[in-house]
Amino acid sequence: MKKILIALICLSAFILLTACASETPTPVPPTPLAATDTPAPTTAPPTATLAPQASGICTQGSLPAYITKVVLAKDTQGENFEPVDVTDAFEPTQATFHAIVTLQDAPKNLQLGSKWYLVQAEGYKPNTKIDENTLSVDQGGSRNVDFTLKAAQDRWPAGTYCVEIYADGNLALAKMFTVVDNKQPSGAGADVVKAIVLAEDTKPDTFEPVNPTTTFKPNAPFIHAAVQIEKAPANTKFRARWHPPSQDPLDFDLTTDGTRWLDFRLTPTPDGFPKGAYTVEIYVNDELVDTKTFQVE
């Protein structure tokens, strides 16, 4: 059965890698926005650059056969870099994010790389690259590689993030994940949601829907559920619960506030989205707002 990935799904580990991707300069924190309800364009410093298009961040990629899986975790253990506490949702105080890449029969002199992005968070510029790194797996073979992103401040902004994994300069796989602030949720209800639009893409700075539709292709890089919110108080929890055909539901949470668009993305496997009927439910503080149906054909 094909599994659709929102952020990450399995775990495994093999053997020692001689170089670890954590041996890099400490990255800078994401770029704050001015204190406004709707994100406005800002100039990024040299260490945090805006991707040219939202669709160019965290896209599907082409997974080579020698990369068997990529998982996100809170830590690793042993010389095998075995993942510890595999997850797609981190706390703001998490010191280091780990992206563990499992290789099987990889070629010699393989160049592996990672790029880390802040996709969206209240008060920060969308689609900002936080850090990147490349290392050489000279011996190839079967082993684990631990790419890490270390915090440069006390807390990560609550929001949506992405790590992209590259093999010899080509995007292999991307993983979406979240930082969730577990403060007491606000008392907001469904009335803070003004619109829910399924679309092929969203605008890179505002996340407004682009090419609204209810029919998608199996090779679509994402399926977007753009949610327009208005005057949501602080610590309002929004959830998209995706129901792929013949599969368990997949949840994606975002705690935020303000007046703006939110972008919930469903990400396919490298083989694409399974054909069939789907639904997505949108919740505010665990209250169902609406259910949207769509097709992949």
Image (tube, rainbow, N blue to C red):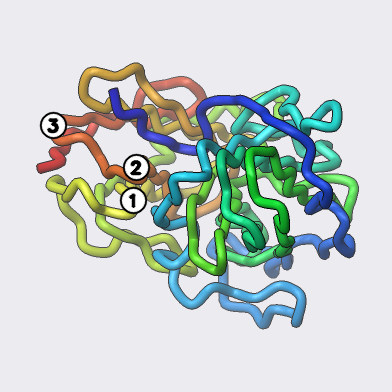
Left-right relation of 136 to 103: right
Disc 1 residue crowd, few under 14, some 14–19, many 20+, Cα 10 Å? many
User: Looking at the figure, which quarter contains the C terminus?
Assistant: top left
Depth order, front residue of 171/85: 171
Q: Earlier in the sequence, mark 1 or mark 3?
A: 1
1 or 2: mark nearer the eye: 2
Quadrant housing the N terminus: top left
Quarter of the view holding residue 76: top right
Find residue 222 and name its label.
Answer: 1
Q: Earlier in the sequence, mark 2 or mark 3?
A: 2
x and y, in percent, of residue 74 in the image: 76, 31
Q: Position of residue 187 (x, y in %)?
A: 57, 26
Could you tell me how many numbered marks the image carries? 3
Q: CA distance from mark 1 to mark 3?
A: 16 Å
**In front of the other: 103 or 42:** 103
| Amino acid at pointer 1 | Phe
